[in-house]
Image (cartoon, rainbow, N blue to C red):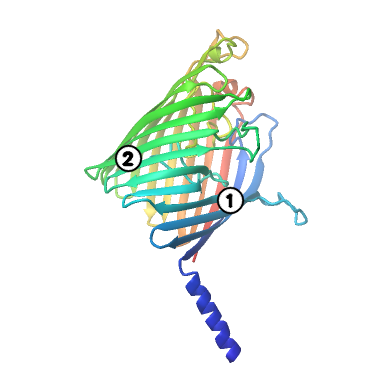
Amino acid sequence: MRFTLLTLSFFSSLVSAFAQFTFGGEIRPRFEYRHGAHDIPSSDDKAAIHISQRSRLNVAYAFDEKWEAYLSIQDVRVWGEQGDRGDASTFNLYQGWVQGNLAKKWQFKLGRQELSYDDGYLFNPRNWGQPGRTHDVGLIKFTDSTFQLHLLAGHSQNRADNFNTFYDQQDYYKNLQMLWMHKEIANQWKASFVAVNRGLQRTDSTLAYDHTMGGNLAFKQSKYSFRIQAYGQFGDGLEIDRKSAYLWSAQAAYYLSRNLQISLKTDIVSGTDTQTTQDPLAQETNTFDVLYGYRHKYYGHMDYFYLSFAPSTGLEDLVFGLKYKPVPRLTTTVDLHSFYAQASLTSPTDVQEPVDSHLGEELDIAFEYQAYEHVKVQGGYSQMFATPSMEVLRGHGNHKETANWIWLQASFILKQ
């Protein structure tokens, strides 16, 4: 009896000591059937099937009503990728940051963290990808009732060297600075402005600095909404002397009924003519870099563009969408994309011979079902109807082959 009382006393003290901790996590397995996802298939390509899984453990800590800290570790792997006798580990730190109040409306946030701004065209954690994306940066934030301002800076290095400052990670930047401002107007309007200065490491050890500036304007009412945004990009090219590029997007959505919404959207991402790309004396590129934003969400679920392949000719994407919610816990979507090369595409054997800019259509059908409070099931089917121009753009494949993709995913959210 005495032992039981001591044990209960110990655990009571432990719970009290950890009262400001919040634990959570996620386990997310995903089944995929691929025959033409990410890339146009060839005649002899066979379908691929795999199951991947993301497992995360999150710990949040708040103290003195002024400080917060957050840790998130994750393991991402394909089932069977590592044998039971292997000693390799895929665990890594996904997030690790501390946030504190500088003044009444000012905060700072320091460490590895997710970045998500506006509609995610330039910065988003890319939650679809099992690894996600975070940034090692420092952030100063000002927050008022209708206005926000963020100042951000980051510097990347391979390791703590004594002399060398060369950074060879191609997916990230050497230096990054950003200013972001957001304003809410009359409850229905939102406007924002962003300016990004980024330094990329060249192979010759010099840095190429490009600059991205633009804005976002959005309106939302109970039945309809629209959004327009535009970004310009200029400065140094990574392999070519100068960059001059742009991205603009417009979208309108309307509820035909309480449960049915239709939408129309167009994205135009500037590119460089094939003839200019193949010219060794070319001094300017017009290919826009979409930075660290969404790919899967905006440019088709099959990820033909801007994930593992960035078309030098840019992209025009016209999208017709339907969203239907037959019951409260179930949402279904149908999106039809029509893809075009933004800049002129020419024959690989004769740069003077133009190729039709139409790359194909992609049909994305998906559903999301909230089975329980902490359990969500998602899945879908996608098919690409490629044209011969897609073969020219990718440099391989057979546009007549069936290119499709099936996926099924379950998300189990762990909470304290």
| Depicted 238 relative to depicted 353: above or below | below
Please give the name of the residue rendered at 40% of the width and 44% of the height, measured from the top-left corner.
140
Camera-side residue of 180 and 397: 180
Q: Residues within 10 Å of mark 2 (few under 14, many from 20)?
A: many
Query: What residue do we see at 39% from left, 29% from top?
Result: 213
* Left or right, 329 with reference to 45: left
**Would you place residue 166 above or below residue 132 in this image?**
above
In the picture, residue 267 is in which quadrant?
top left
Residue 174: x, y in percent?
55, 33
- Residue 58 percent location from the top left of the image: 53, 58
Quarter of the image with the N terminus in it: bottom right
Q: Nearer the viewer, residue 208 or 278?
A: 208
**Mark 2 residue type:** His
Say the numbered circle drawn on residue 93.
1
Q: Amino acid at mark 1?
A: Leu
Coordinates of residue 210 in the picture (x, y in percent): 48, 25
